[in-house]
Image: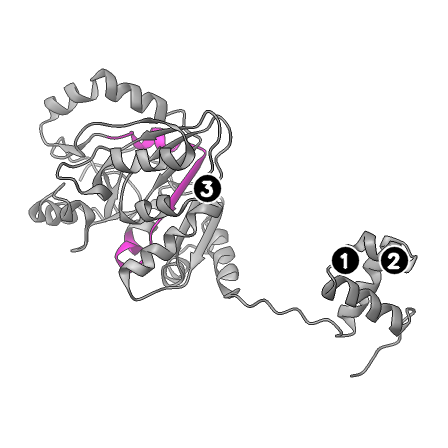
Amino acid sequence: MHVRASRYTQDEIVRCAWLYYERDHTQDEIAHKLGMSRSRVVRLLKEAKAQGLIQIKINAPVHLLSLAEQLQSRYQSYNLRNVRLVQTIANETEQKKALAGELAPAFTPTKGDIIAVTWGTTLGYAIDQLPLQPQQDLTVASILGGVQGGIHTASPYDIAFRLGQRLQASVYTLQAPVFVRDPEVASLLLREETLQDTLRVATKARIALFGAGDLTEKSTLESVNAISREERLWLRDQGAVGDLLGHFLDRHGCALNLHGRLTPISLPLEHLLTIPERICIGGGSVKHAMLLALLRGNYITTLITDEATARYLISVAPYNHNGGKKQHNGSKNE
């Protein structure tokens, strides 16, 4: 190995590097042990790297970190602040579980926080993987109605209570169906006091947890009978690519006006946008179109997804967005 000229002796460079990297001494401990200043220790460690004496290897898929940074940068003007990626897995269930494992490091509630939560399979896995972290004065509020039949992933009560148990938080549930097909009935239901109480609490949330509902043949809404196959196909004909809190979005992230045909019992999207931390978890090719719509609509501040989805989102991202944000009125006539 060629050693470049240095004002430090080789002995002190090696000794300093050995103590720091092999014996896990702090820089202050090394300075005291070798009788030198801490600043000299810092310079010696830099010299060890410069001479190639130290080679650091990270045994992890670090390319995901670079890819996540690139994705965040491309959608930064759409309010995306954080991205966490996992490797793409062919098995759908294993993919969901891998995504679920990334919620814990992204989810950091603090004392007094209100957490707004929807429901879904991946979100259910994620909540079950959260470490028990009892904190004072936390509140969980459902922001989307559910379905009957005991399907736990489609139950706002089950998901909210499971999250509440992990956090030892008080829980507000939205005891209502996902959709009401009669506008007058929907209006009456939304005026019901217990629903209003839950939604009122949710509007004060600091964190929102949600997924990306798709309208493919694997649609969760269809699989839990929240919508029929005919309704799913009709929604696609209207230009919908998926749903957020039961509100159907087009590919630009604009909510469609369905003229009361499917009225969601959920938090209005304009209120969701006022929640500071909006964490979306979802991946796989069936989610591509909806995740793009959610990003374009400024709905996501933290995205948890897989590598292939990230590469897709980067491939369709604008290179120059001029720092502007797409303006939304919450509905679009089709």
Q: In this view, does 70 lie to the left or right of 119?
A: right
Helix, strand or loop under label 1: loop
Q: In this view, does 157 lie to the left or right of 164?
A: left
The percent position of residue 297, horizontal first and vertical second, equals: 35, 42
Give the Cα separation between the discs numbered 3 and 1: 32 Å
Residue at 21 percent across and 27 percent down: it is: 175
Up/down of 20 relative to 75, above or below: below
The residue pinned by badge 1 equals 25
Three-letter residue code for mark 1? His
Q: Give the crowd class for mark 1: few <14, some 14-19, many >=20 residues within 10 Å.
A: some
Up/down of 171 relative to 20, above or below: above
The percent position of residue 186, horizontal first and vertical second, equals: 15, 25
The quarter of the image holding the N terminus is bottom right
Q: If you read the primary sequence from the N terminus, does the residue marked by circle 1 or circle 2 appear first?
A: 1
Helix, strand or loop under label 3: loop
Residue at 82 percent across and 71 percent down: it is: 14
Q: Which tag is nearer the camera, tag 3 or tag 1?
A: 1
The residue pinned by badge 3 equals 107
Give the Cα separation between the discs numbered 3 and 2: 41 Å
Q: Which residue lies furthest to the bottom in this view?
A: 1
280, 23: nearer the viewer: 23
Give the Cα separation between the discs numbered 1 and 2: 10 Å
Is 268 within the magenta?
Answer: yes
The residue pinned by badge 2 equals 33
Three-letter residue code for mark 2? Lys
Look at the image and give the residue range highlighted in magenta: 266-289
The answer to whether mark 1 and mark 2 are in CB contact below 8 A is yes
Q: If you read the primary sequence from the N terminus, does the residue marked by circle 3 or circle 1 appear first?
A: 1
The percent position of residue 263, horizontal first and vertical second, equals: 17, 31
217, 75: nearer the viewer: 217
Three-letter residue code for mark 3? Phe
